[in-house]
Amino acid sequence: MKKNLILAVSAIFVIQACKKEVPPSTSNTDVQAKVLGDLSTEIYLNSYATLETRTSKLLSDVQLFIANPDDTKLDVCKQDWKSSREVWENSEAWLFGPVSTESIDPRIDTWPVDFVRLDSILNSSNTLTASYINNLEESLKGFHPIEYMLFGLDGKKKASQFTDRQKEYLLALCQNLNTLTTELHTSWNTSGGDYTNEVTNAGKTVAYPTKLSAYEEIVNSMIGICDEVANGKIGEVFTNLDSMGEESPFAKNSMVDFTNNIKGVKNVYLGTFDNKDVYGLEDFVRSHNLSLDGRIKQKADLALAALAQVTDPFGKAIFTQPIQVQAAIDAINSLKDELETGLLPLVQLQVK
Amino acid sequence: MRNRFKLIISFALLVSVFAVSCRKYDENANDPQAEWFSGGNQTFFDGTVTGFDHAFNGMTEAQISAHEVGDKAFDATFVTAPAPLNSGLGPLYNNVSCVSCHVNDGRGKPPLAGEAMKSMLLRVSIPGSNPHGGPNPIPGFGGQLQPRSIVGKLPEAEVQMSYTYINGNFPDGTPYQLRKPNFTLKSLEVSIPGDIMISPRVAPPVFGLGLLEAIPESAIMSREDINDADGDGISGKANRVWEVITESYKLGRFGWKAGQPSLIQQSAGAYNEDMGVTNFIFPIENSFGQTQYDGLNDDVELSDSLLKAVAFYMQTLGVPARRLVNDPMVTEGKRVFNLVGCGSCHVSTYTTALNMAFPPVSNQKIFPYTDLLLHDMGAELADFRPEFLADGYEWRTPALWGIGLTKKINGHEYFLHDGRARNLVEAILWHGGEAEASRQKFTQLNTSERQALLKFLESL
């Protein structure tokens, strides 16, 4: 009994120690500024840095695979693709700034793939230089053509199935993805476009003449991705019962993608990323409306739980698990509604 | 007697009902707050990256659903046929989806150094006109250059863009520099006549168009003054253009030279010419009759319902609200705007027609800052390429609503039909022709007046 008590007390201490606390003396305005600073530096910028690192690892592992192909090395590449994809999907919870205005998003993540053209590139003897890939249509570069190359149509591609030309194209695509993610990271970095500064110092910057405009951008993009996942990525494919609309079908990664999108929303709300816990929107909300804070967290968790109930690959689940798919759509829409009717009005009321 | 009394009462009631129902809202009443609502009831207080992407208020569930279908279709990337999803790109095209040019439902831009031309295009023609009075297509090229093609086909041409720089000074000594684009066509697929006319066009924003479509034709026509009868130096001419579905001439409202009568025809034309995707309004490939024609028996490539949904999507995109309307500098800028004469063509407000069939656009006081008429903009801006009644010097006044959010939503501030202006000041300095007097007055402004005017424009 005593042992249990000690355990419980120490658990509370551990939990408390892991969680930053807003000092009671911190004013609302300070919290508002701190949230912007932490989100832009620790969540947004850090995520893009991680994305660059992971696509760089994908590139070097693909080089290793091509130099001496075997299934073990191919599996490493497949895992790299998934881990790059994870942080990219997280980052879709803030599709604003350079990723949007510089059209980096479509160059990284366009669906569908133009297979007719992809085959013709493979069958041609065109030299696949960086500029050649750069000038290709969006439907021929980025995550999904790489996914197709690595996983194959059935998701079970083996090292022995790679032609020389496929290896060459795969390598060029991975180089291009790494270049684009570097461009994205640089656009937020102090040494580059420094969009981080635009958000951090909102109220005094060109992009955000008021703090409110930055807050609205942040919240709107969270609402936007919830809408996109519930009613676009899942809803459209489910309503049409058309598995051709499914993204990431080769790696059978769609459900993971959706989950990572909602985790991205949660990261921004909580201020968590990569085992760090910094100021997030919750710190702002909690100083005004504890029950709203509770509802948002609960609905984010319910959305993630509902997504976890879809156990078949998405393209199959729309036929085999319609109830679970519909429940996931409803749960994400419910989160979206809470952000739209609870969080956004609070921000508009409290932030200047 | 009792009956007569009843009758009188009934009559009196009837009269009062009529009297009340005929009473109109006095739009001339001084209501400065109305200016916040650029799109009337379809105004959205969102200055973020999604500011141009709001579905109209007051729609039925079915209409919201149609809007969403159109939204997805607007984003859909087309690929080479045969394909199970979004098949039918090309064989010749400018881009692969609507959104690739109208990024975030906003404005395209000219290519930067070393970039391919992506969110702008070149309309081309030779002297003369087509059977309906529109531009005369170039044999072997058609009415628009497609610099991209699917595998196995050749792009019509490679377009190279360069600039000539012009330095100038405001009367107060402040220097400025303008740049004028030059276009060179290279790697032509077949030889091209020497007398071609080129009209470069940047993709325009697509929000608020349903409200512009709802302005009564009579209201637009009432401002027409082709021979400048009122002697104010501003003419204003309506374009009359061919409507394919009704096979008749209609008022041109959309496009840089008001060459399109409706949003559905505008969308259908863009699918066909820009993406090579055939549809029921334009069922023939843009490469028909050329060596590049694919000969595939797969037309039409876009379903009627999707085309209608995309047109409906654009018809039902609301307008971002003004910012800082009551800021003293903005108020001063508005005064300068009218003093200089900008408001003669960039007409601040219209009221849309009553529309019982689609209440969201009915009887809305909107602030688009356009008269939707053609004006001679001078030789420096001229494309020398007629389009129906628009001559080579004339352009349709573009709407200014939302212009202050361009940097935010599209990441740039390239303005005018070919994106030559790198900011609002340059855009104003390029105004000539009917707007020459206004341009002169603008240059005479002192620095604080100029800044106020810009602040006003940025608040739109």
Image (spheres, rainbow, N blue to C red):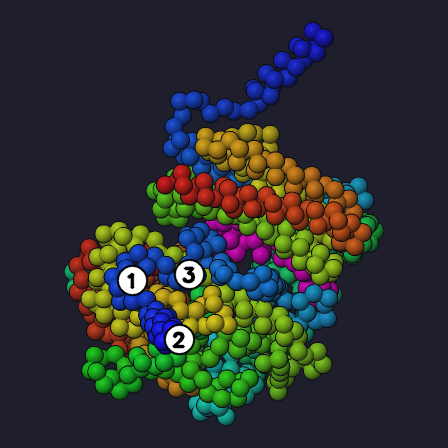
Q: Say if the magenta span includes residue A112.
A: yes
* Mark 3 chain: B
Circle 1 residue: B425
* Rendered-image quadrant of the C terminus of chain B: bottom left
- State the residue lying farthest toward the front: B1
Circle 3 residue: B41
Circle 2 residue: B3
Amino acid under disc 1 = Val
Q: Residues within 10 Å of mark 3 (few under 14, many from 20)?
A: some
**Residues in magenta, as a range:** A93-120
Amino acid under disc 2 = Asn
CA distance for labels 3 and 2:
46 Å
Taken as a whole, is the magenta stretch helix, strand or loop? helix
Depth-wise, is mark 1 or mark 3 nearer the camera?
A: 3
* Mark 1 chain: B
Depth-wise, is mark 1 or mark 2 nearer the camera?
A: 2
User: What residue sits 81% from the left and 45% below the top?
Assistant: A70
* Mark 2 chain: B
**Precedes in sequence: disc 1 or disc 3:** 3
Closest to the observer: B228 or A71? Answer: B228
* Rendered-image quadrant of the N terminus of chain B: bottom left
Residue B261 % position (x, y): 46, 79
Q: Label 1's element?
A: helix
Q: Is residue B288 left or right of residue A239?
A: left
